[in-house]
Amino acid sequence: MAAPGPIVIELGELDAVHAAYSYEGRGGQAVRRLKFNRSTSLAPFMASEIARIAGGLTYDFVCPVPIHLLRWCARGFNQAELLCAGFPAGERKDLLRRVRLTRPQVGLSAQDRRTNLLGAFQSQVSLNGKHVLVIDDVVTTGGTARECAKVLKSAGAVRVELVVFASQN
């Protein structure tokens, strides 16, 4: 899979969104195989692509989008955590906690995606003056990422950017 230049999108509460690939074609295929077919052998390549995109950014911490414990038990892994493997351990932080089980975003309308995750995340850490990169596999409407950014900024983060493997926008 040849790497195009980063796709950059502005989204609401997020300060910026950076994607390695478009969700159309092989980028989306890799995301679907990782998440739904449990093809974790794809994760190292996907993680290296996310780290490549983040290499030109300035940040204090990298934070994977958390999944609820019940979803983790069903799937056996959090794909966003796997995609953080390209960052040094000192930069990766569990700054967010998933406190509410929500319906999967797949198949929901754009409006339902925006409201599905309200109140789903919490942060117990002080992020005063910090710049956080949120890592996820894909961004479609940005509902998950905006909710994460809202919580991180309420904890004091001054800048929150999203870095994903694929973007539908």
Image (spheres, helix red, strand yellow):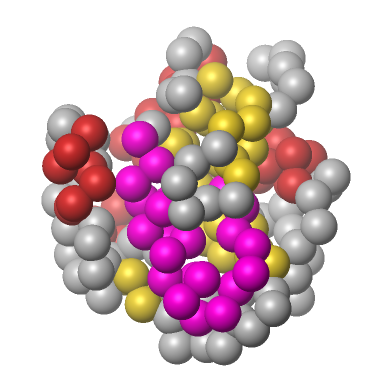
Residue at 50% x, 81% y: name it.
155
The verdict on residue 143 being magenta is yes
Position of 60 with respect to 14 (left or right) is: right
Do we see residue 44 in this rendering? no
Q: Residue 123 at what x, y percent from top left?
A: 43, 80
Residue 37, horizontal then vertical, whole percent: 34, 34
- Counting labels gives 0
- Front residue of 37/123: it is 123
Residue 106 at x, y = what percent? 23, 35
Q: Residue at x 60, y 73 (%)?
A: 157
Q: Is residue 33 above or below residue 26?
A: below
Q: Nearer the viewer, residue 78 or 116?
A: 116
Q: In the picture shown, does residue 30 fall above or below 96?
A: above
169 inside magenta stretch: no
Looking at the image, which residue is at 76% across and 63% down?
Answer: 59
| Nearer to us in this view, 94 or 125 | 125
Q: Which residues are magenta?
A: 141-162
Q: Residue at x 75, y 47 (%)?
A: 54
Residue 33 drawn at (x, y percent): 41, 29
Q: Spot the residue most to the top.
A: 25
Q: Is residue 56 above or below residue 89?
A: above
Residue sitting at the far right: 56
Q: Quadrant of the N terminus?
A: top right
The quadrant where residue 3 appears: top right
Specify whether residue 8 is in view: yes
**Along the horizontal axis of the image, is 20 left or right of 77?**
right
